[in-house]
């Protein structure tokens, strides 16, 4: 019975066998907060001003549509970065004061979380050039969830050595690179004892969505940057080709 209880109750298992989502010392709500904030601020950014006529008044001045979109994007990124940094500092300091735990890679954690927020922000901004704010926000949030589920599916495929399912997860990580960055944030929070304990479980650990044995490779980070640039270019093209 003790073994069964340990499997069902994370708080009764040794800290080394818990993932970061199960360990109350590790801050894990922050990544979701940043991506939700990014969606909320970006989804109505363009569509709201088009509907209210503000965009038309601004574009009547010597401001190109490209400059309008880039300016919006820079402003929204500044908001998300400011919020993300402030929230991260509060969470990390609070955890340090309450439990004495300090994540081993706080700078990497912040970089991955902000990168994830900028990815979903750019997607929501692009959608805002074509659809209403609420619709764009819902679409962006759903796609974020699908990408996260795709990462879980890919992990299950890796655990069972199923190449087809693994490729599905890899494809979702490339189409929307939020889950790969999320894994990087998870890795940055995990103490070495957790990494060692979980890695010792073998291939099955790949199915755990709240564990990452290593950060995403540099090539994936570069891909995420290129994805952001491509999505921003698509937003510019979409807005330039739209009648206001």
Image (cartoon, rainbow, N blue to C red):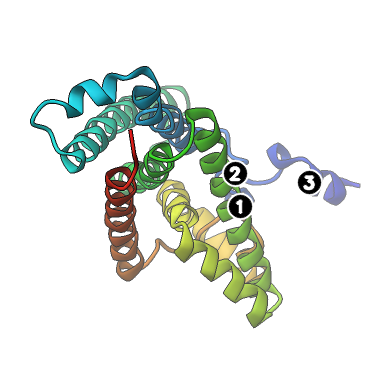
Q: Residue at x 58, y 67 (%)?
A: 169
Per the image, the residue denoted by label 3 is: 6
Sequence-earlier tag: 3 or 2? 3
Instruction: Indicate the position of residue 195 as horizontal and vertical percent values.
Output: 50, 59
How far across and down, in percent of the image, does residue 203 sit? 63, 73
From this view, report whether residue 10 is shown above or below residue 159. above
Locate the C terminus by quadrant. Answer: top left
SS of the residue under disc 3: helix
**What separation in Å lies between label 3 and label 2 (alpha carbons)?**
34 Å
Q: Is residue 213 visible?
A: no
**Is disc 2 placed on a helix, strand or loop?**
helix
What SS does tag 1 mark? Answer: helix
The alpha-carbon separation of the residues under discs 1 and 3 comes to 31 Å
- Relative to residue 11, is residue 27 drawn left or right? left
Residue placed at 28% from the left, 61% from the top? 226
Residue 12: quarter of image: top right
> Could you classify mark 2 by the number of other residues whose Cα lies within 10 Å: few (under 14), some (14-19), or many (20 or more)?
few
Q: Position of residue 81 (x, y in %)?
A: 28, 33
Residue with the mark numbered 2: 142
Mark 1, other Cα within 10 Å: few <14 / some 14–19 / many ≥20: some
Labelled pair 1, 2 in contact (Cβ < 8 Å): yes
Residue with the mark numbered 1: 146
């Amino acid at each position: 019975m003790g073994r069964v209880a340990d499997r069902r109750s994370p708080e009764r298992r040794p800290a080394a066998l818990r993932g970061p989502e199960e360990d109350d010392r590790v801050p894990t709500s922050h990544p979701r907060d940043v991506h939700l904030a990014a969606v909320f601020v970006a989804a109505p950014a363009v569509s709201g001003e088009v509907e209210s006529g503000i965009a038309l008044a601004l574009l009547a001045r010597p401001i190109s549509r490209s400059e309008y979109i880039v300016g919006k994007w820079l402003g929204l990124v500044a908001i998300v970065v400011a919020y993300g940094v402030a929230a991260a500092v509060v969470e990390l300091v609070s955890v340090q004061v309450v439990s004495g735990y300090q994540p081993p890679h706080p700078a990497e954690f912040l970089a991955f979380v902000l990168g994830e927020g900028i990815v979903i922000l750019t997607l929501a901004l692009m959608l805002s050039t074509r659809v209403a704010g609420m619709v764009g926000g819902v679409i962006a949030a759903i796609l974020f969830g699908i990408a996260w589920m795709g990462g879980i599916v890919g992990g299950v495929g890796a655990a069972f050595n199923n190449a087809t399912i693994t490729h599905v997860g890899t494809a979702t990580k490339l189409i929307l690179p939020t889950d790969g960055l999320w894994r990087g944030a998870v890795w940055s929070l995990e103490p070495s004892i957790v990494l060692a304990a979980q890695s010792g479980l073998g291939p099955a650990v790949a199915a755990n969505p709240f564990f990452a044995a290593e950060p995403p490779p540099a090539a994936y980070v570069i891909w995420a940057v290129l994805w952001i640039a491509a999505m921003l270019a698509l937003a510019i093209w979409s807005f330039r080709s739209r009648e206001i």
